[in-house]
Amino acid sequence: MLDLQRAGMWKRLSAALFDAIILFTVIVGMALLLSTVLNYDGYVTRLDGLEQKYGEKFGVDLNITAEEMEKLTKEELAVYEAADKAFGADPDVVYTYNMMLSMAVVIVTFSILLGYLLLEFLVPLLWKNGQTFGKKLFGIAVMRVDGVRLPAILLFARTVLGKFTIGTMIPVYVIIMIIFGRLGMFGTVIIGALLLVQAILFFGTRDHTPIHDKLAGTVTVDLASQMIFESPEALLEYKKRIHAESTERRER
């Protein structure tokens, strides 16, 4: 087994931070584009108009804060609750709200997916050695744990299954559900548990291996000192040559 020249933790964190900044910029741009195409703001305006309509009808402000609600008298609170109930029962409100939720999921999902496919799959595929912009900048690479270069299928699985699905979208979906009132404390517990697992794997283990590397069987290495082989056959040939040279030296 070849010695793995693992990249240092701080070098990996620096590369990840650099990549995250670029990824966030791309995702925001994609989200703005999709939001415009799907007319998300139009539904927001429509819902605000319906909220204003019921507020004027009952003579209350449906958009008050929790602190402001606590200051309401019993009579004012009763009127507010009646207005809120009527607002929530309006079929147009329900339809608009559900459309906003559905579009939020679509916009966020496709924006993040396209960002990952571009920066975490296509770029490393072109540069080889699993290098993103950040990894290229800090001289580190990703390979299989046996020292072989990542094939496209494994790089795709590492990106989509590990980074996109488990590392990003599960927490994002939970956050969306919390924002739209579909999940409460349970959602917070899910996010906390995922973050705890990630932290334990990266900071609490000797190899500092995150979930996506565990799933894909990959490792981040220092490119300057690590040999990366094109294929398992090339690795086998190298081992045979080293073994033959070692045997020849012992026989002398």
Image (cartoon, rainbow, N blue to C red):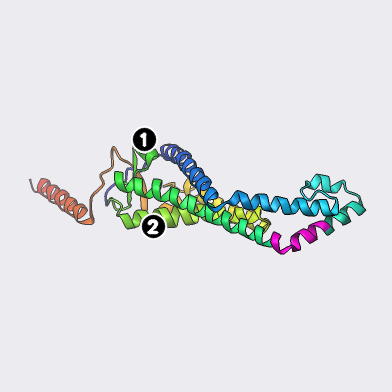
Which residue corresponds to the image point at 85% horizontal and 50% vertical from the top-left? 59
Residue 67 x %, y %: 81, 45
Q: Which residues are magenta?
A: 83-93
Instruction: List the single residue furthest toward the left.
Output: 252
Left or right of residue 236, residue 216 in this image: right
Q: Name the kind of residue labelled 1 in the image.
A: Leu
Residue 193 visible in the picture: no
- Quarter of the figure that contains the C terminus: top left
Which residue corresponds to the image point at 42% horizontal and 55% vertical from the top-left? 160
Q: Callout 2: 10 Å neighbours few (<14), some, many (20+)?
A: some
Secondary structure beneath dot 1 equals helix
Considering only vertical position in the picture, is 95 above or below 25?
Answer: below
Q: Is residue 87 magenta?
A: yes
* Distance CA(mark 1)–CA(mark 2): 24 Å
Which residue corresponds to the image point at 75% horizontal and 63% vertical from the top-left? 89
Whichever of callouts 1 and 2 sits on the residue coming sooner in the sequence is: 1
Secondary structure beneath dot 2 equals helix
The front one of 20 and 218 is: 20
The front one of 113 and 154 is: 113
Badge 1 is on which residue?
A: 137
Badge 2 is on which residue?
A: 157
Q: Name the kind of residue labelled 2 in the image.
A: Ala
Residue 214 x %, y %: 42, 55
User: Chief secondary structure of the magenta span?
Assistant: helix
Q: Which mark is residue 65?
A: none
Left or right of residue 184, residue 228 in this image: left
Residue 58 x %, y %: 85, 54
Image label count: 2
Residue 83 x %, y %: 82, 57
Q: Callout 1: 10 Å neighbours few (<14), some, many (20+)?
A: few
Residue 82 visible in the picture: yes
Which residue corresponds to the image point at 43% horizontal and 40% vertical from the top-left? 19
